[in-house]
Amino acid sequence: MPLPLKILNRLRLGREVAARVTPSRPDHLAWVYVYPMLDPQNGVVVKPARMGAEPRFAALGEGNPIIGFLVCHLEIEAAVAEEVYKGIRDDLEDPAFDHPDLAIVANEEELAVLLQRWVTDPMTLHVPMDVGYRFNKGPTLLRKLGAI
């Protein structure tokens, strides 16, 4: 399953994507999240000029500023997710149960192969805030992995 150009373009700009996916267990909810990783030697994060716009990556020279992708797959009990979102609505901290399966892939081809495990339609990948789960951001997940 090749990833659609719309999704690849978003990732190439350094923007995350996510999707709600089918859980492997009953009474669970599942999501997948993809974070493009910037090579600090070859790129920078450009802050948007207008309020509400997303930052993007820009290359410092020739080549791709993205050195890989962090992929997070998370599956939790539906009842637990509801309790957490009740707490988030009450301005509580991020969920403590967020222990996702994390993987790093080197390129877009490896990303497409890995996503086939969970994503049946790659067009369901879009802005993470629209998938019904508030993910820890990529840098936080990379720290959990010990990658940064």
Image (cartoon, rainbow, N blue to C red):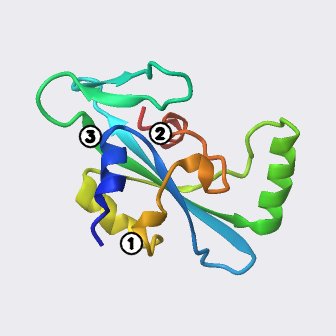
Q: Which residue is drawn at 49% across and 40% down?
A: 138
Alpha carbon distance from label 1 to label 2: 22 Å
- Looking at the rendered structure, the kind of residue marked 1 is Gln
Quadrant for residue 77, please give it.
Answer: bottom right
Alpha carbon distance from label 3 to label 1: 21 Å
- SS state under label 1: loop
Q: Residues within 10 Å of mark 1 (few under 14, many from 20)?
A: some
Of pointers 1 and 2, the one earlier in the residue sequence:
1
Location of residue 70 in the rendering, given as x and y in whole percent from the top left corner: 41, 48
Q: Residue at x 77, y 67 (%)?
A: 78
Q: Name the residue under label 2.
A: 142
Location of residue 20 in the rendering, given as x and y in whole percent from the top left corner: 58, 64
Of pointers 2 and 3, the one earlier in the residue sequence:
3
Classify residue 57 as left or right of residue 31. left
- SS state under label 2: helix
Quadrant location of the C terminus in the rendered image: top left
Q: Which residue is drawn at 36% across and 65% down?
A: 114
- Against 106, residue 67 (above or below) is above
Q: Which of 131 and 50 is in front in this view?
A: 50
- Looking at the rendered structure, the kind of residue marked 3 is Ile
All told, the count of numbered labels is 3
Location of residue 139 in the rendering, given as x and y in whole percent from the top left corner: 49, 34
Q: Which residue is drawn at 35% across and 46% down?
A: 11
Q: Nearer the viewer, residue 121 or 70?
A: 121
Classify residue 134 as left or right of residue 37. right
Q: Which of 9 and 110 is in front in this view?
A: 9
Quadrant location of the N terminus in the rendered image: bottom left
Q: Residue 116 got which mark?
A: 1
Q: Name the residue under label 3.
A: 67
